[in-house]
């Protein structure tokens, strides 16, 4: 995979691409397979780096993983789960946030778990205090060591009653994966209810779990003694679908995203329409397009947990907003530090200012603190080519969109990060008529 793309911008993206399963569900469903006494089969699995990382981590714990990239199926046989040495697992430190979710299943299977220092995108502090509190309350001991965290459970994890300080996606998944085989009933208040979480609940139910979700964000789990394997088709990646939709808008293009589903994207579709983008729901996907002319307009919006506007939809859309008439205000309420990617957009000519105040809506938990979490975008501004380095997964894809929208040749470095969550994005760009060349870092330095 190339490290650098030299993008000749200014050409509208036009054509059809396909998205497969959601990165942020597939990795969790793979971890759930650890809980079964028989093998599991997951379908619609995309070929992305995160799937590889989780396969490797499960492999280290004795799970036999077989991935067929073309068919998009992954089989996971957990018959021989074993403990993994600190040194082996340490080699995976910093690659992913998924190891924290393996704790509950490993505690059930082996009575202990060791997880390395976590990775993931640098978009805030990303603490794991909620996760550790859940595991402690369920009876695990947690010991921080030099290279990671060692957990032990002398007996079966115990059901408990917990209220999350914030509806964290990961902490809700932690609780689900730990409580399904715990002794007794567990109740989680202020839970996250993202579609990816509901799909994880569907998987766990197929495995034999008893879980109910109340309308007031309360999840109730009755622990069972045994679970078996599952067969499941992953829901579509609504973040990837929205990223291509925003790319269509920013470049004045017309992109049909096969596999995209309306239900999980309703909030995005409303904002897309308010900005002036057009879409049509098809039988097997969604077509997104720019209606032509100077027709996009600014909006005031904020990110939130489901059913709000996803934080991961924000960065690609901000690039499109640089091409809209008037002021837009985007208030980021999920992560404290998710506007770092706008530095590169400013370098390319965008007018974006970031503020510490909660602008445009309700006060959020970052309001009285020192985080630049509101952005004001003034458009439209033509974007000009630049030499940029991608900062994280979603910010990185936004940089790519900006380069595709900008006049001239941009150099976008560090694009391997995008492989973490966007399947075959180089091939998809070609299918959409993008003009670019792939280089390795050394070649790009020589060319500079
Ligand atoms: N938080 C805590 N303590 C915790 C856990 C979370 O303070 O123990 C805070 C976080 O710092 C953050 C907020 O709670 O401010 C929300 O974090 P959450 O736990 O919901 O996020 P996550 O589970 O770590 C997943 C996705 C993210 C996505 C968020 C929100 C995965 C692997 N990652 O992260 O996806 O942005 O939910 O929907 O599922 C991405 O795909 O690029 C990505 C970053």
Image (cartoon, rainbow, N blue to C red):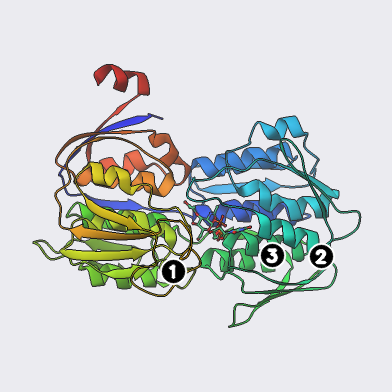
Residue lying at the far top in this picture: please name it.
446
Identify the mark at residue 331; answer none if there is no mark.
none
**Distance from label 2 to label 1 (Cα)?**
31 Å
Badge 2 is on which residue? 182
Spot occupied by residue 177 in the image (x, y as percentages of width and height): 71, 60
**Can residue 422 be seen in this snapshot?**
no
Residue shown at 48% from the left, 70% from the top: 306
Neighbour tally class for label 1: few under 14, some 14-19, many 20 plus, Cα within 10 Å = some
Q: How many marks?
A: 3
Q: Earlier in the sequence, mark 3 or mark 2?
A: 3
Q: Quadrant of ligand 1?
A: bottom right
Residue at image x 32%, y 49%? 342
Looking at the rendered image, the quarter that the C terminus falls into is top left
Work out whether 122 lies above or below 182: above
Evaluate if marks 1 and 3 touch, with contact meaning CB atoms under 8 Å apart.
no
Residue in the foreground of this view, choosing between 55 and 331 = 331
Across and down, in percent, residue 370 comes to: 46, 56
Q: Disc 3 vs disc 2: Cβ atoms closer than 8 Å?
A: no
Q: Position of residue 302 (x, y in %)?
A: 38, 68
Q: Which residue lies under the disc numbered 3?
A: 176
270 vs 211, left or right, is: left
73 or 94: which is nearer to us?
Answer: 94
Residue at the spot of label 1: 264
> Quadrant of residue 4 in the image?
top left
Badge 3: few (under 14), some or many (20 or more) residues near its Cα, within 10 Å?
A: many
Would residue 152 be visible to someone looking at this image?
Answer: yes
Position of 33 with respect to 139 (left or right) is: left
| Relative height, residue 162 to residue 240 (above, below) | below
> Label 3 to label 2, Cα distance in Å?
10 Å
């Amino acid at each position: 995979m190339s490290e650098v793309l030299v993008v000749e911008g200014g050409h509208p993206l036009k054509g059809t691409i396909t998205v497969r399963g959601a990165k942020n569900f597939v990795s969790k469903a793979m971890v759930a397979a650890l809980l079964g006494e028989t093998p599991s089969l997951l379908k619609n699995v995309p070929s992305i780096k995160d799937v590889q990382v989780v396969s490797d981590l499960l492999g280290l714990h004795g799970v036999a993983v077989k991935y067929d990239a073309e068919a998009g199926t992954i089989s996971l046989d957990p018959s021989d789960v074993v403990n993994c040495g600190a040194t082996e697992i340490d080699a995976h430190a910093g690659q992913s946030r998924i190891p924290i979710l393996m704790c509950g299943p490993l505690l059930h299977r082996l009575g202990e778990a060791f997880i390395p220092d976590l990775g993931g995108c640098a978009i805030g502090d990303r603490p794991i205090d909620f996760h550790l509190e859940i595991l402690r309350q369920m009876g695990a001991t947690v010991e921080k060591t030099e290279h990671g965290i060692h957990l032990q459970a002398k007996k079966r994890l115990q059901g408990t009653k917990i209220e999350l300080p914030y509806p964290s996606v990961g902490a809700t998944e932690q609780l689900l994966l730990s409580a399904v085989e715990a002794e007794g009933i567990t109740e989680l208040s202020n839970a996250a209810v993202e579609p990816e979480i509901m799909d994880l609940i569907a998987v766990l139910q197929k495995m034999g779990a008893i879980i109910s979700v109340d309308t007031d964000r309360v999840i109730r789990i009755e622990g069972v003694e045994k679970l078996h394997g599952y067969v499941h088709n992953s829901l579509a990646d609504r973040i990837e679908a929205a990223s291509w939709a925003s790319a269509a808008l920013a470049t004045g293009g017309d992109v049909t995203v096969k596999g995209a589903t309306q239900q999980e994207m309703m909030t995005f579709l409303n904002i897309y329409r308010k900005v002036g983008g057009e879409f049509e729901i098809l039988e097997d996907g969604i077509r997104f397009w720019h209606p032509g002319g100077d027709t996009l307009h600014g909006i005031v919006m904020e990110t939130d947990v489901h059913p709000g506007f996803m934080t991961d939809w924000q960065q690609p859309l901000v690039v499109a907003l640089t091409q809209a008439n008037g002021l837009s205000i985007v208030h980021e309420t999920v992560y404290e530090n998710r506007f770092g990617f706008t530095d590169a957009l400013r370098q390319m000519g965008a007018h974006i200012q970031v503020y510490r105040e909660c602008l445009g809506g309700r006060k959020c938990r970052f309001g009285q603190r020192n985080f630049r979490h509101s952005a004001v975008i003034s458009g439209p501004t033509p974007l000009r080519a630049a030499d940029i380095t991608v900062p994280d997964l979603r910010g990185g894809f936004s940089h790519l969109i900006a380069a595709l929208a900008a006049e001239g040749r941009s150099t976008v470095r560090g694009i391997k990060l995008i492989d973490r969550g966007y399947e075959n994005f180089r091939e998809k760009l070609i299918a959409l008529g993008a003009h670019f060349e792939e280089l390795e870092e050394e070649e790009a330095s020589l060319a500079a």
